[in-house]
Image (cartoon, rainbow, N blue to C red):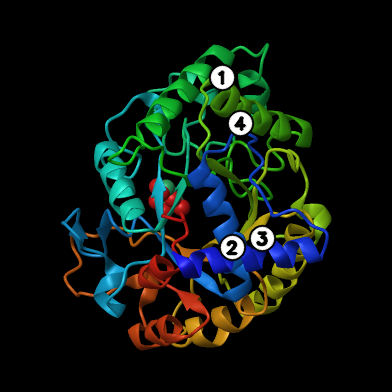
Amino acid sequence: MKTLNLILVLTILTLCSFGQKPPVPTDKNATKETITLFRSLFDLQKKGIMYGHQDDLMYGFNWWYEKDRSDTKEIVGDYPAVAGFELGHIELGSERSLDSVSFTQIAEQIKIHYKKGGVITLSWHLNNPFTMQIRDTLAKWPHGTAWDVSSKEVVASILPGGKYHELFNTWLERLATFFISLKDDKGIPIPFIFRPFHEHSGSFFWWGTNICTDNEYSALWRYTVSFLRDKKNIHNILYAYNTDRVTSFEQYMRGYPGDDIIDMLSLDMYDRGAQFGGELDNALGFITREAISRNKLAALSETGERKGMPDWWSSVLLPVVSKYPVVYVLTWRDAFKTKVTVSGNPAKSFPDDFKYFYNSPRTFFLKDIQKANVYGR
Ligand code: BMA
């Protein structure tokens, strides 16, 4: 407690000495825990980077929902600091996500990870509300899914005045009901990072850059935040804006909904070849520079190794992310494959190299951030 007070005083003094106020989330009514989380992460990103893994607590390469199990823990003996979960199909009122994961179990794992002091991030591959209405018995994937980019009318159709606006409200209601259920044992809302309408600079989701206008995209974001924050009174969310690979800040900002509702500037970028290191370096350079000047967090919210590269974690990822104040880096899910019998983890297919990443003083896993006490408990 004493150490924490000292850290708090030092932080306040440092900030005051620069004439700056301590950073706060955009939601003026953010809960105490959410404000503390935001500030802790803001501090943490100056010291190192948290490791995150999608669906780490739900399933792995060759197992499905087993108590306390995690692919990450199996390799390095600790859980990721950041646990990612996916909400696609919550909008339909389904019991399971598009990846067949039970929403009840997702909520359980969110509570457990929060109790341990870990950070939570949620993504949402929501269906296509417009093309879903087109009944076509012969239609194949991606018809009606998040990946269905066959119509450019989707975003306009769900905004106020649009044909499917009420349907979208129903979807947001269901999302909100799930969010409201995320409480700890004392009934305190669990803070989390929400990253909807992700990878905007790509055109592979119906909210992508060539599928809707920048104004529509921004309006979609603003409507969603206002619905959750103002209508449903949910005040435990940090909102993450996100794009796929970009080469300039202008490109990154296309359709940006505004500093008044965004808490984190994030980027998704997978290693598809030798140019990756340079491209990531460039993008993180301008994103973190802007994030700092706007009092926002920054994250590499999805990434993945170059196929077959044995030292990707140590020679590509770590050197680049270590240069910048990036709060976390997250690798995507280890899709469960029933037919595969070898134990191991495709996302960390070179365990020794992943252990090197784990052992770096620059990286934080769950035990490290338990010490940092990001919720100030
Ligand atoms: C994607 C893929 C899909 C999955 C989706 C949501 O990037 O992994 O298989 O359904 O994420 O988790």
The residue labelled by disc 3 is: 245
Q: In the rendered structure, which amino acid carries the disc numbered 3? A: Arg
Report helix, strand or loop for mark 2. Answer: helix
Mark 3 or 4: the one toward you? 4
Q: Along the line of sight, which residue is nearer the eye, 11 or 273?
A: 11
Report helix, strand or loop for mark 4. Answer: helix
Mark 1 or 4: the one toward you? 1
Q: In the rendered structure, which amino acid carries the disc numbered 4? A: Val
User: In the visual, does 286 lie left or right of 129?
Assistant: right
Quadrant containing the C terminus in the rendered view:
bottom left
Label disc, if present, on residue 231 of the rendered structure: 1
The residue labelled by disc 2 is: 8
Image point 77% across, 37% down: which residue? 214
Q: Along the line of sight, which residue is nearer the eye, 40 or 98?
A: 40
Report helix, strand or loop for mark 1. Answer: helix
User: In the visual, does 92 lie left or right of 66?
Assistant: right
The residue labelled by disc 4 is: 225
Q: Could you classify mark 1 by the number of other residues whose Cα lies within 10 Å: few (under 14), some (14-19), or many (20 or more)? A: few
Q: In the rendered structure, which amino acid carries the disc numbered 2? A: Leu
**Gap between marks 3 and 4, in whole Å?**
24 Å
Mark 3 or 2: the one toward you? 2
Q: Earlier in the sequence, mark 3 or mark 2?
A: 2
Mark 1 or 3: the one toward you? 1
Image point 39% across, 25% down: which residue? 177
**For the residues bearing labels 1 and 4, Cβ distance under 8 angstroms:** no
Q: Is residue 47 above or below residue 234?
A: below
